[in-house]
Image (cartoon, rainbow, N blue to C red):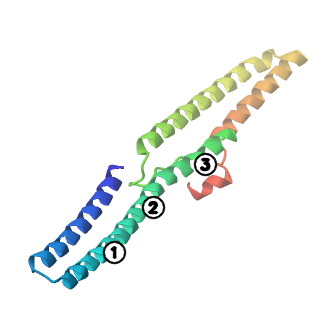
Amino acid sequence: MLRLAALGGGGVMLVGVLAYRAHREAVESGASPEALALGGETMLWLIGLGALVVAGLMALFGLVLTHRVAGPIHVMSLYIATLAAGRYPRMRPLRKKDELLGFFNRFSEAVDRIREREAEEARLLAEVIETLRPLATTQDAQAALSILGSIRARKRQAIEGPTSGALKSVA
């Protein structure tokens, strides 16, 4: 916001200085009323042109700034959609001049920690299944091992599986 305010304020200041100089030159020259009127018209043109230039620069600056904010939000929304689908996205860094870098880095760290925790749980489930397999003599025990096996498979697929098609554009 400070950059946008500085751009707008600086532009208005420049237009004001140019208009003041045109007015002062007309007054100091001892100009006739017609010349003063012409100077007034010149000031109006300077103000109008300056306002258009400042508006154009602010619009361009605003577009760049919103792109630097909207880009990371779009990327993170795709990552969140992948997480919601039960998979872990392959994270990529943001562009150098993007905003929200700190937030994105914390988001990436959280995803990495959750992925590591899922991998550890899948490893522990594999150990439990292998330990209990010889002891599962009843049908209920075998069904319980089957459930544990499907949970382990789902965790492994979420960790190792491909990302969603929507993320191919940002991977």
Tell me the crowding category of disc 3: few under 14, some 14 to 19, or many 20 or more residues within 10 angstroms, Cα based.
many
Measured Cα–Cα span from mark 2 to mark 1:
21 Å
Give the residue pinned by disc 2.
Answer: 63
Sort mark 1 into few (<14), some (14-19) or many (20+) by Cα contacts within 10 Å: few
Q: Is label 3 or label 2 in front?
A: 2
Image quadrant assignment for residue 171: bottom right
Q: Is residue 95 above or below residue 129?
A: below
Disc nearest the viewer among 2 and 1: 1
Q: Nearer the viewer, residue 26 or 156?
A: 26
Between the C-alphas of marks 1 and 3, the distance is 43 Å
Q: Residue type at mark 3?
A: Leu
- Residue linked to disc 1: 49
Rendered view: 5 above or below 104: below
Residue 90 marker: none
Q: Position of residue 23 (x, y in %)?
A: 18, 73
Please tell me which residue lies in front, 30 or 156: 30
